[in-house]
Image (cartoon, helix red, strand yellow):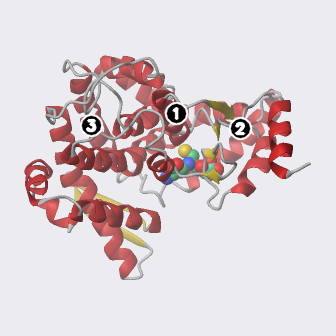
Amino acid sequence: MPRADRDTAKLAARGKSMSQYEIYGALGSPYSMKARAALRAKRLVHTWSGMTAEDRAKVMPNVKAPVIPVVRKPDGTWTNDSTPFLLSIEGEGRDLLPPDPVARFACLLLEDMADEWFMKAMFHYRWAYAEDAEWVAKWLIYDNLPNAGRDQVEVVANDIRGRQISRMALVGCTPETAPLIEASWKRCCRHLEAMALSGQRFLFGDRPSIADLAFYGQLKVMATDPTPMAWMRAETPYLYRWLDQIDDASGIEGAWRDEISIPVKVLLAVAGNTYLPFLQANLDALEAGAKTFSLTIEDGRYEQGTFGYQAKCLKSLRTLWAELDDNSRAKLADWIGPNTSLLS
Ligand SMILES: N[C@@H](CCC(=O)N[C@@H](CS)C(=O)NCC(=O)O)C(=O)O
């Protein structure tokens, strides 16, 4: 049988069709939640699989970097980085990027900040608080080993908890950086709460953008982890509800709005004050051959290991910035502030 026919037969046997996306992720993984909600918002046919340990052995060899979610595209190819994946399918289904060039750049900058900076808070809350670490480790492993039974789940949960805690300093989550990370996260949550109550449903209009989905991904899992869940319910209750609204936005009919909203403007100021200096310090340290870097942001000292991936993020933002016209750049610079210079 020709290969394509064989693939079709195999998929049919699994009750799947050739034209659908298959997402392999975890309910506790922010980027998995982002990708799933994105395909829902785009109205693209897909299946969701919370990966068990068994699935993992079959799925992970298809991709280079061992990170989830992993996606099998309808053409049979595999991919696994939510940002390039979603940008590569921007022409399919509903758009996730606003059409106006200023809004589009703002959207991509905020998406990047949610993925790479906001995620510090997700990791910090998850593993720094004993109650959260115990609860999270158990729910992650139960999803991973649904047939294993309590004893095995709890043994493996202990291992994963130890492993994740040992990675905290590398990604910048230490007792020294904790106050800064929490304060920065809370500030962004308050801006997002203002968005949820602003009379405009999402950051760039009444339909979700890739930036909304990136914030959602991190907050969705934090809405189950005990400490951030309690804080959000008490302090940003409408943002907490908004998470359930964007979770499945397939039926939301809304339009982009050309005018940049106040919540977006203030989040762009956070990007200027916090996120761009963070990316620049990482790039400087990498270029100097250093293994770690530190800088003062939001009145606190921040330190973490250097990451090539985050250097790539800054370079992509610079490419996008270079493509804008002077008028668009001037508008954005007003909101991003003096650190706009880091974009050139
Ligand atoms: N930039 C990637 C990040 C993906 C990522 O870091 N995924 C985490 C889980 S949320 C991961 O796979 N960690 C290793 C693992 O779980 O095995 C994306 O946007 O998809």
Q: Residues within 10 Å of mark 3 (few under 14, many from 20)?
A: some
Q: Position of residue 40 (x, y in %)?
A: 51, 28
Q: Name the residue furthest bottom.
A: 288
Q: Position of residue 171 (x, y in %)?
A: 46, 57
Amino acid type indicated by mark 2: Met
Residue identifier under label 3: 188
* Lower sequence index among marks 1 and 2: 2
* Residue 54 falls left or right of residue 102: right
Does residue 54 lie above or below 146 as drawn? below
Q: Position of residue 255 (x, y in %)?
A: 27, 25
Mark nearest the camera among 1 and 2 is: 2
The answer to whether residue 178 of the structure is visible from this angle is no
Q: Amino acid at mark 3?
A: Cys
For label 3, the SS is: helix
Q: Residue at x 27, y 41 (%)?
A: 99
What's the distance in space between the residues labelled 1 and 2, CA to CA?
Answer: 16 Å
Q: Residues within 10 Å of mark 1 (few under 14, many from 20)?
A: many
Residue 32 or residue 166, whichever sits in front: 32
* Disc 1 to disc 2: CB gap under 8 Å: no
Decide which of tag 2 and tag 3 comes sooner along the chain: 2
CA–CA distance in space, label 3 to label 1: 25 Å
301 on left or right of 242: left
Residue closer to the observer: 164 or 276:
276
The residue to which callout 2 is attached is 18
Quarter occupied by residue 236: top left
Residue located beneath label 1 in the image: 39
Near mark 2 (Cα within 10 A), the count class, few <14, some 14-19 or many ≥20, is some
Residue drawn 36% across the image and 24% down it: 232
Could you tell whether 226 is left or right of 56 in the image? Answer: left
| Residue appearing at x 22%, y 48% in the figure | 101
